[in-house]
Amino acid sequence: MVWSCILPSFLASMVEFVEALTIVLVVGVTINWKSSLLGVGAAMLTLTALIIAFGSTLVLFIPIEVLRLVIGIILILFGMQWLKKAVLRYSGLKALHDEAAIYEEKLHGLIEHGDIDPSKFNTFGFLIAFKSVLLEGLEVVFIVITFGATASADKVQGIWMASIGVLMAFIVVVVLGSAIRKPLTKIPENTLKYIVGIMLVSFGTFWSGEGLGIQWPFADLFLVVLIAFFLTLITIIIKWLKPYGIAQKKLQMEKEVSPYEDNN
Amino acid sequence: MKIIINILKETFNFFCGDWRIFWGVAITLFALELIQHIDTLTFARPFMAIIFLIGLSLSLIVALKREITK
């Protein structure tokens, strides 16, 4: 199942890279590119060390059956978190992730911080870039290790495959980001989060189910049934929540209008 | 002590972030383990996959229902 290593890693990394790139761009534009890129480099080194440390521990010491059960459960919890956010955004109960708005907000925050010499290395800028790449990257590392180590019988090859997915996403995001030098608002981040959430929960259910002793009909092909099941479930949930989202928006609009009416 | 609690909180937020989802999944897994190991519950073994899927679905629904009542 090569695709089951590459595709989730590619999509999940794309989401995280877009988020990290937004912060890196802000630091680069407002402070300087030196601090921003050094922060990125330091974070990437830390992430590589984490992959080597945790990846090799999983590959060398833990049997695949145990790995699938434990990782399956963690993937379900992790994926449900992504799905919950995506559902709340689609139903209107939470604002859609707007990279342009985040970019503007961070930009103003940094300008207000003041006293920035663009020619000198800036510790504040370095730390912001480092923190954002490290935090977003941690989720990518988690997905690479879990999908890589469990999706394929050969755990080392699996991690390599998952890393290829990450590398492809990194190239796509960096090329697009450096070409437009603005946040990548065109990438439908919420849709990607929704797709990856479905994949994480489906694979997690499949692997942990196997670990619990469930014998899925049609073996690996049952993954398609699980994906279809969760897609249907989420579509029904979004339909159920949409009226609440509309009601919440109306309430917010009324609250915004009412002070104006009071003044008149 | 505070640092340890903070680390545990951050770890929980990173992996799950919602106690309703966590307990929903935990109870589902516990129920499946009982079905697997207790002889009087053998009759439920063919339905383990369905119980698993219902448990997971309910965990997510309960967590989302909480967001409406907030």
Image: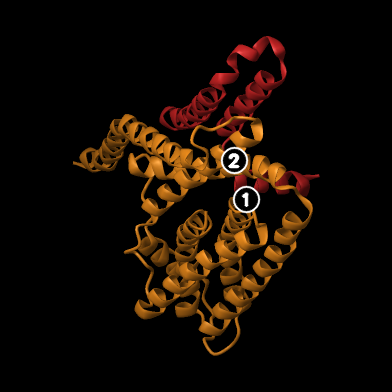
Chain colours: A orange, B red
**Residue B36 percent across, percent down from the top left:** 67, 22
Q: In the displayed structure, does residue A60 sit left or right of residue B32?
A: right
Task: Check if mark 2's residue and mark 1's residue have beta carbons within 8 Å.
Answer: yes
Task: State the residue lying farthest toward the left.
Answer: A264
**Residue A109 percent across, percent down from the top left:** 47, 67
Q: Nearer the viewer, residue B43 or B24?
A: B43
Instruction: Indicate which disc, 2 or 1, sits on the residue closer to the N terminus.
Output: 1
**Residue A129 percent across, percent down from the top left:** 56, 71
| Residue on which disc 2 sits | A207
Q: In the displayed structure, does residue A205 sit left or right of residue A191?
A: right
Task: Name the disc covering residue A97, or none.
Answer: none
Same-subunit check for callouts 2 and 1: yes
Q: Residue at x 51, y 83 (%)?
A: A33
Q: Quadrant of residue A260?
A: top left
Task: Name the disc covering residue A150, or none.
Answer: 1
Q: Residue at x 28, y 43 (%)?
A: A256
